[in-house]
Image (cartoon, rainbow, N blue to C red):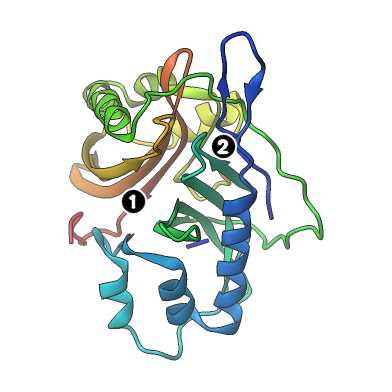
Amino acid sequence: MRPSEAALIAGITLAAAPALAADPAPVIAAERAFAADGLTLGYKASFLKHSAPDAIIMQPGPVNAHATLKAAPDKGGPALYWWPVWAGLARSGDLGFTAGPYTVSGKHGGYYFTVWKKQPGGGWKWIYDGGAGGSGPHVPPPPTTKPRPLADAPAAAGSAAKAMKEVGEAETRLAAAAQKDLKSAYLAVLADDARIQGSPAPPADSAPERERELGTRPAAIAFKALGGQASKAGDLAFTYGEARWTKDAAEARGHYVRIWRKGQAGWRIVYDQLQPLPAGKPASA
């Protein structure tokens, strides 16, 4: 699900020159248009209009968005409203994301996360859309909000294929460490400007808040990567997968979604959302 704006900027330092930032304005505009159509066209029409043919949603496991949405009723459904408060764009300008709060029928619902990909014709379509529930009052977006930039990325893998190989290796290392000590595993790979979310609390965007959010998660989680995509420049990558852990002597399941960014220290997570499943639901579609 969905999102005013603030923004991540994933850029690069060229030799001794200052870092060149990628302006996330295109994905912010795409998200705003998506949200506006959600109010005028309705859930089904707006989600189909703004998603790529290969877009995925969690139902509860990853499924093709178009196949699932086309089977949904043309009318009805809850009134959804969302606005971006954070966004990012790859150096190559072809992959980005937005995140923020959403409401359901006027009440606070939680926090959405959307991954956007530039299409061959130059327009933007989302390739992943999802969210996690949350608590708290509904706070409307301010009339005007300037995007808050995050640190630039001073490195890049050079290609999407190389980036996914490197990110796959980083995910494997994280998964192995998370089965022993989840909190330490994450702290070793979180960027200084990372946001993480999964509990009902708002996304954690500072060191103390990230520590608090990690403290709400199980001490150990078994992660299994399922897919993802990287930018052409190889500086930004989106990944998703399964998550399993033990709760009250029983197995609990869910999914994760992440944004990885490559910098001088290597690949670091700048966004992570854990989506627990209700008891009894399978983790895969």
The amino acid beneath tag 1 is Pro
Near-viewer residue (47 or 175): 47
Q: CA distance from mark 1 to mark 2?
A: 17 Å
- Image spot of residue 87 (x, y percent): 58, 45
- Image spot of residue 229 (x, y percent): 32, 43
- Image spot of residue 131 (x, y percent): 44, 56
**Residue furthest right in the image:** 143
Is residue 165 in sight in this rendering?
A: yes
Q: Which residue is found at the position 53% from the left and 24% from the top?
A: 153
Dot 2, how many residues are within 10 Å of its Cα: few (below 14), some (14-19), or many (20+)?
A: many
Pick whichever of labels 1 and 2 is earlier in the sequence.
2
**Residue furthest front in the image:** 121
The amino acid beneath tag 2 is Ala
Q: Which residue is found at the position 71% from the left and 44% from the top?
A: 147
**Residue furthest top in the image:** 16
The kind of secondary structure element at disc 2 is loop
Residue 36 in the figure: left or right of residue 148: left
Q: Which mark is residue 204?
A: 2
* Quadrant of the drawing holding the C terminus: bottom left
Near-viewer residue (133 or 27): 27
Give the quarter of the image for residue 221.
top left
Near-viewer residue (269 or 222): 269
How many discs appear?
2
Residue 168 in the figure: left or right of residue 95: left
Contact? badges 1 and 2 (CB < 8 Å): no
- Image spot of residue 71 (x, y percent): 28, 83
What residue would you read off at disc 1? 276
The kind of secondary structure element at disc 1 is strand
Is residue 239 in sight in this rendering?
A: no
Q: Is residue 182 above or below residue 107?
A: above
Q: Which mark is residue 79?
A: none
